[in-house]
Amino acid sequence: MRSNILIIYYAATAVFLTLDYGFGINLRAAFLENTPGLRMGYYLVLFCCFGLMLWRPQWSTFVGVVESLATMIALIFSMALRSMVTTDAMLETGTGFVTMPEIVNFIIVGGAAYVSYVQGAKALASRSRSD
């Protein structure tokens, strides 16, 4: 059941990519809004996770754990750097500060990544004990 949810989550990347680049609604990767190259790379990684899960379904939990951990790290660094390190350009232009939509995205995506990571880690731990 868990792997089916993960596969659907990664398959939905196509919808999020269309919303982001087609309609300007960035829901999945708002934490990378200021870095379009990294944002496209993030979408590419999500598509690779989807392909890997279709190719090797037994790896779904491991792929989900690794991707969730990477997402949490990226979220934390992107938010921390922009909220703790103020640059001259930010002060001069008034842009580049963390916005409310980014905070909401941080809470939603970070929460989902955390839950996915914890549940996946528990599943991997229980597998290793049963082997």
Image: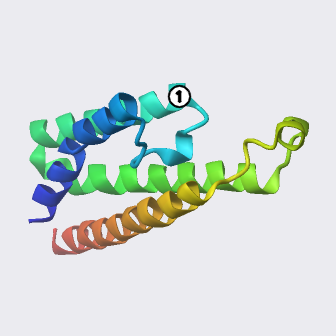
The structure residue drawn at horizontal position 11% and vertical position 36%, both measured from the top left corner, is 55
The structure residue drawn at horizontal position 17% and vertical position 43%, both measured from the top left corner, is 53
In percent of width and height, residue 6 lies at: 20, 55
In percent of width and height, residue 74 lies at: 55, 48
Q: Is residue 101 left or right of residue 115?
A: right
In percent of width and height, residue 31 lies at: 54, 47
The N terminus is located in which quarter?
A: bottom left
Q: Is residue 102 above or below residue 34?
A: below
Secondary structure, mark 1, is helix
The C terminus is located in which quarter?
A: bottom left
The structure residue drawn at horizontal position 42% and vertical position 35%, both measured from the top left corner, is 24
Q: Amino acid at mark 1?
A: Pro
Which residue matches tag 1? 36
Residue furthest to the top: 37
Q: Quadrant of residue 47?
A: top left
Instruction: Pick the residue in front: 26 or 118.
Output: 26
In percent of width and height, residue 72 lies at: 50, 57
